[in-house]
Structure formats: structure tokens, C-alpha cells
Amino acid sequence: MKIILSIDGGGIRGIVPAAILAYLENRIQQIQKDNRIRIGNLVDFVAGTSTGSIICAAMLIPDETKNKPKYTMDDIVQMYFNMGDDVFKKKFWHGVKTLWGLLGPTFPASNIEPLLLKELGHYKMGDLLKPCMISGYDIEKRRVNFYTNDDKDHKYEDYYVKDIVRGSTSIPAYFPPARFNHGVDINTIIDGGVFANNPSLAAYIEVSKTLFDGEYKRKHPHELIIISLGTGKINQKSFPYKKAKRWGKAQWLMPVIDVLLSSHSEVTSYEMEKIFEAYDSKKNYTRINPSIILGNSSGLDASKDNLCKLLKDVNNYIEDNKDMLESLANDLIDMNYLIKPD
């Protein structure tokens, strides 16, 4: 049985899945009476899109021992407080130059690139502790890219993690595309959320191309546990017919991005449920996606006030779903053959 973790995109709302994982990690530490345990050591494969790629990468970066994650999940939650204001900070002269986003991206690359370097360093994909997958879309080659680190081709093992995450978080119109190369392979990447905001289905397929137990072998739903983490259910903005019928290309740009990101996650979740039901393995797929009630539904509101409200939404979800999360924590313990203390 392999444990697959999938983390959606959603901007600053990435603090939601990070906080859920922090709760699970802390609960497992409490049960085991061992604060050295990291959830990154307990799963077999991690997939992330956009903000999910930050969590994916951070939870798999090794410490100095090379066999344990450098960051706890609490550390990763704190990253959102530390990085958020800078990533989504509007700079006056950049605004003037781009007419506040009309003639260029809302935020410059300099908002995010130094922070990714600080947190992710110069680690390469092959350095990460577990097999993983990060999504991005190459706008020059017009193709989907799934950056992996343990498949048959080993194509991306020497790519820098920070570059791939930079690409996966390049939300169109908000950040410029990422451009990086490895040898002659040039990548011009935008946010993977344009095609896989919820990467669970892609992860389900990718694990069959990943080396496990010395072999590449197709995995069926009864052989997998997939935990899919969303960045929160939000009240979707309505687009009234009377307004939309008069829209042209300019007016449709932002609504289309909004619809693409939200609808993909919903469709993928539905498809995953049906796949696992068809194999009589419904219990092997878990979707965790707390309702956002107190926090701002925008993925761009990085204020401390909003981050605290998002954490309150997470805490409310945890209180309402303690039995399910307790069962999940114990499943992770049991499947890793950890011995529960008396």
C-alpha cells in the first residue's frame, strides 16, 4: 500500500492544507511520543500545484542528515506568514510601469524569487526525500509539464527545485512566467493550475511510472491511499448573464482564470471519487477541503488578519472532523509500521 499526498493550488490559501498537515503531524507525534516524526517521512509520493508546490517541496527538502525533512509542517505554516506580505506586495513604480496590471503582471518576479531561494536553496529535484510531482505549463512549447524526480526517464532530477516551484506558482496576469534551463532544455512556465489545480488525478497516474520497491508497476486504487488537500471551499463569485453577454476579450480574462481554477478542482475531485468507487476502494480516497467562512476567499490577501482568520476556519474544520482526522493519523501510523506506545 502506497500513500499519496496531493495539494491544490490557491495562492495564500495554501496555509489551509499546510495547517491540516501540521495538525496531522503534531497528532502523530503525540500518539507516538516522538517529536522527530515528519509527515514527509510517512508518505510515499507528494504532488503539488502552484502554492501546493511550495508545500510539496518544503516538506521534502532534507536536513543535514539527508534522511529527515528540514522543515516541520508548523515551519511551513509560518512560511506563509513570513513570505505572504512580500510575495503579494504591490510596488508603486512597478504599478506605474504596468498601469497597475493592465500592461504587465501585477507583481514583479523579484517579489517571490529571493524568497524561494531563501527557503528552498539550491536543492535539486533529485535531492528531495520522496518521489514527487510538480505541475507547470510551458507556454513556448505549448505543453503540459509534470516535473518528477523518480520516474523512468530521470529527466528532471538535476533541475533546481526553486525554479520549478517558481514556474508552478506563476499565476497568469499576476506574475511573469518563469524561465529557466537545464542544458539546452529551456522552460518557460506558468502556473500548473491552468490545467491541474487539483493534481490528484495526475498523481494517481504518475505513481504507476514511479520506482517503488525496485520496480515500475501500475498501481490500482486498492493499492493506494490518496489524501487530496484543497485550499478551501469558497463562495464562488457569480457572473450575471446581463453583464456577461456584453463582455469582450478584456472583460472575460479574469473570470476565465477564476472559472478554470475552481472548476478543475471540482471536476478532478468528482473523477477521483468515481474511479475509487469503481474499484470498490472508496475508503482509500480522502478529500479534505475546509469551508472558508471567516477568511477572505481571495488567494491574494496575505494580511496577517486574513491568515489568522483562515487558520480559524481550519481549526473549526478540525473540531468538526476530529474522528476522521484521528482515523487518518492512525492509518498513517499503521501503514508505516510504527509501534504505538502503551
Image (cartoon, rainbow, N blue to C red):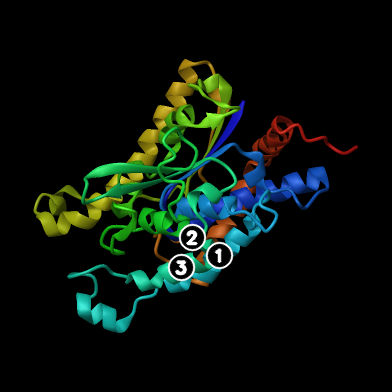
- Residue extending farthest front: 183
Compared with residue 331, is residue 322 higher up or lower down, i.e. above or below?
A: below
Identify the element where label 2 is drawn. loop
The reply to whether residue 180 is visible in this rendering is yes
Q: Which residue is located at x 26 percent, y 52 percent?
A: 257
Q: Quadrant of residue 212?
A: top right
Amino acid of disc 2: Gly
Of 117 and 181, which appears nearest the observer?
Answer: 181
Q: Residue 56, position in %: x, y? A: 52, 49
Judging by the rendered image, the residue that carries numbered circle 2 is 295
- Indicate the secondary structure of the residue bearing disc 1: helix
The residue lying at 69 percent from left, 39 percent from top is: 329
Q: Quadrant of residue 288?
A: top right
Q: Is residue 178 left or right of residue 21?
A: left
Q: Earlier in the sequence, mark 3 or mark 2?
A: 2
List the residue tagged with mark 3.
302
- The alpha-carbon separation of the residues under discs 3 and 2 comes to 11 Å
Q: Position of residue 316 (x, y in %)?
A: 61, 51
Q: Which residue is mark 1?
A: 79
Q: Position of residue 40 (x, y in %)?
A: 63, 46
Check disc 1 and give the amino acid type.
Answer: Met
171 horizontally vs 114: left or right: left
Label 1 – label 2 distance at C-alpha:
18 Å
Q: Which label lies toward us, 1 or 2?
A: 1
